Image (cartoon, grey):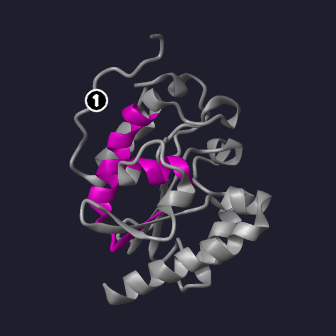
Amino acid sequence: MAGAPVGLPVLPASYGELREAALVCTRCRLSGTRTHVVFSDGVPDARLVVVGEAPGANEDATGLPFVGAAGKLLDLLLQTVGLAREESVYICNVLKCRPPGNRNPLPDEIETCSPFLEKQIELIAPEALLAVGSFSGQLLTGRQGVALGQLRGQVHSYKGVPLICTYHPAALLRNPRWTRAFWDDLQTLRSIMDGA
């Protein structure tokens, strides 16, 4: 299959080298259509890692995750529970490159890019994880094909780290009625972090 992943990479052990490896990655078809690799934003000693799905147009243009309207909403909602990306939050995505037309990530793209995410989480060693959107929730729980509604409302574990799955902030912009559920998920997350 054209554009299929080529073997999984052996990733560097240091954060800086991992970032550099991602910035020059050409392991899947998305490297040919991206403007920028969107590796992360926030602090590398974060208490919380937020994992989204894939960069959008604004993120591809800037090289930073969650910078559009959804990112502003995410920042605002995190601040309501005392968390800020510049102080205690690290934000990244399952995919580091934007899928054309903001289409959903394809399984081979997730397979190719997920080792970067796994290594990011390992190096950050957060107290908790927040998966926003179905693709990140399914990947981190290992429950592919399970609806986000079935992943929400419970505490999962990713390699021993508490994991909360919730709606993507972009979904909240389209469906404001889900904001209360997102808020409830943040309250659970905050309780976990307060007990850590």
Position above or below: 127 against 145: below
Residue drawn at x 70%, y 72% is 179
Quadrant the C terminus occupies: bottom left
- Measuring from the top left, give residue 117's x and y in whole percent: 37, 48
- Measuring from the top left, give residue 95's x and y in whole percent: 49, 41
Nearest the viewer among 121 and 138 is 138
- Measuring from the top left, give residue 17's x and y in whole percent: 30, 45
Which residue, given by chain and number where applicable, does mark 1 sit on? 8
Q: Which residues are magenta?
A: 110-139
Dominant secondary structure (helix, strand or loop) of the stretch shown in magenta:
helix
Q: How many marks?
A: 1
Residue drawn at x 62%, y 34% is 35
- Judged from this view, the residue extending furthest toward the top is 1
Magenta stretch: includes residue 187: no
Residue drawn at x 62%, y 58% is 168
Residue drawn at x 38%, y 53% is 140
- Any part of residue 132 in sight: no
Position above or below: 117 against 43: above
